[in-house]
Amino acid sequence: MTSVSAMILWWTLIFVALTFIPPVTSYTILGGIDQEKKDDAESENSFVTEKLRHLQKQVELRIQSHEPSGRVSMAGTLWEASPLLADYITNPACPLEAFQRMRIHDDDDGNVRLQPQPSTVVELGSGVGLASLAAAFLGCRVFATDGSPSSIRLMNENFEKYAPDFPMPPRTLRLDWGDMDATQSLIQSELCCLPDVIMASDVVYSYSAREELAATIRLLCPKGHSGRVVIAHRWRTDPADEGSFFESFDDDFDREEVGMEFLPDDGYHRTRNMMDMRYPISIFEMRRKC
């Protein structure tokens, strides 16, 4: 066989392989089961367990590793800052009045009761709903929002599981950051007031969405409002860039980082990065300037 004939045969075999043999990344049959469908089923039935130490509760949340399209599910992931936010707002020492007044008390007859006026809490980018779940356990009036249909579905399922434990069940609502009409409708038609707390975790990851997120926060906490903004953030690749989001509020908000005494007493949360001396996750509280 000449070198020319060998080359023709080689390219013919490649063409046949690419045309008629299914790519291995599409699916693999194992024992008659479509492995791609099997993986989808497993991702739909994935769970993560988190302990709410201050409430002496352990919760199991449904999560989702991939969207039906096959891409990684951002909305279906329990990101690192969410458990820390849940831990902070349920801490009996948390100084935020909106959570302090929701503490459970015993009346003179020993019956457990809640304070009569529940705090209104809006969570932005709620994901699978852990922080909203924690606030609802406290007795808050909670509105868990996200722009992802997958997130809404997962939260509904996670909230339904613990419905008997809520003094007031949390609501799930679709809300895209930067949609001012939808945000105004949320305030007027659903909340019927401005929220006492706007909270979020791991939401400063996409530079393209930061302006819309900031605008939504400012509408929910306008000038003259006494509400609080609480954001837990996991520092990632560019702390200076990520920090610029929080600094953008400094002209019209007072901002304070939550102290180390509120962090879990473990090596991870209390170990500073040697490069910038930051803890891996920070919680910022903000309030409108007078």
Image (cartoon, rainbow, N blue to C red):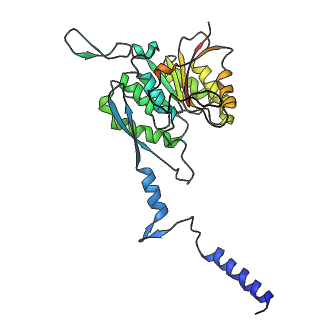
In the rendered image, residue 112, in percent from the top left (x then y), is placed at 25, 17
Q: Residue furthest top?
A: 290
**Residue 17 appears in which quarter of the rendering?**
bottom right
Is 104 positioned to the left or the right of 204 in the image?
A: left
Q: Split into 4 quadrants, where in the image is the C terminus?
A: top right
Question: Is 26 situated above or below 169?
Answer: below
Q: Is residue 94 visible?
A: yes
Is 259 positioned to the left or the right of 91 in the image?
A: right
- Residue drawn at x 60%, y 31% is 273
In the rendered image, residue 74, in percent from the top left (x then y), is placed at 55, 43
In the rendered image, residue 139, in percent from the top left (x then y), is placed at 36, 21
Along the line of sight, the residue nearer the viewer: 83 or 22: 83
Q: Is residue 188 visible?
A: no
Q: Which residue lies furthest to the left in this view?
A: 109
- Residue drawn at x 45%, y 15% is 98
Is 23 positioned to the left or the right of 115 in the image?
A: right
In the rendered image, residue 57, in percent from the top left (x then y), is placed at 33, 31
Question: Is 232 situated above or below 28?
Answer: above
**Residue 31 appears in which quarter of the rendering?**
bottom left
Along the line of sight, the residue nearer the viewer: 39 or 219: 39
Question: Is 142 situated above or below 11?
Answer: above
**Residue 48 appears in which quarter of the rendering?**
top left
